[in-house]
Amino acid sequence: MAGTVEALIPPTARVYYGHASLQRLRGRVAVIDEVADLLEEIGFDPETSVLTYRQAQVLALRERDVSQADIAEALGTSRANVSSIESSARENVTKARETVAFAEALRAPVRVRVPAGTDLYDVPELVYDACDEAGVKVDYTAPDLMKVVSDAAGSAVTGRQISTPLIVGVTSEGMVRVRHQD
């Protein structure tokens, strides 16, 4: 476990890294609330995670609206280093999500190829037909399914038109996953 960071912080602004609740950092209140306990409580394990322990700490603090400057001060490092750690952590999370989406697409019994130029309003019928054929139930109305596809596809949907080919996968549990087809 982490120790106490004291060297760079004056006694009046001392923060006990991993053990404090609310502390003052040079006149600003920062939430440094038992990050080690939080990570333990939610089951974070750096041995099985795509995040390092430090990345998890920084993300936990940033999710509590602690500024990078305050985190840097509490951890005895620079704001630029905290920014780099946060950026790497968010990139790792994005890669992990993409990996999970890929794995789910592999096991999805329904995969619908949606070519570029397809009207977004035509996508639900393509998905429903493929799901009916595979005996898979989708718990989305057509408007909800269009929103899921549009939101997940991001820039691959322009207005109502699919501008980049997509693959819409539906798991046996009815979860819809959308991937860009390269």
Image: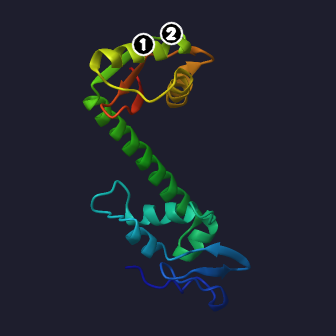
The vertical placement of 102 against 57, above or below, is above
Corner quadrant of residue 80: bottom right
Give the amino acid at mark 1: Leu
Give the CA separation, mark 2 to mark 1: 10 Å
Q: Please, which residue is most extreme toward the right here?
A: 27
Q: Please, which residue is most extreme toward the bottom here?
A: 11
Front tag of 2 and 1: 1
Question: Is any atom of residue 8 visible in this view?
Answer: yes
Query: Badge 2, how many Cα within 10 Å: few under 14, some, many 20+?
Result: some
Q: Judging from the image, what secondary structure is the residue with disc 1 in?
A: helix
Indicate how the structure is coloured in the image. Answer: rainbow
Residue 126's disc number: 1
Q: Which residue is mark 2?
A: 118
Picture residue at 63% right of the left edge, 81% below the top:
23
Q: Are marks 2 and 1 in contact (CB under 8 Å)?
A: yes
Instruction: Point out residue 59 in the picture as x, y percentages from the top left corner.
Output: 50, 60
Give the amino acid at mark 2: Thr
Picture residue at 63% right of the left edge, 67% below the top:
69
Residue 107's disc number: none
Quadrant containing the N terminus is bottom left
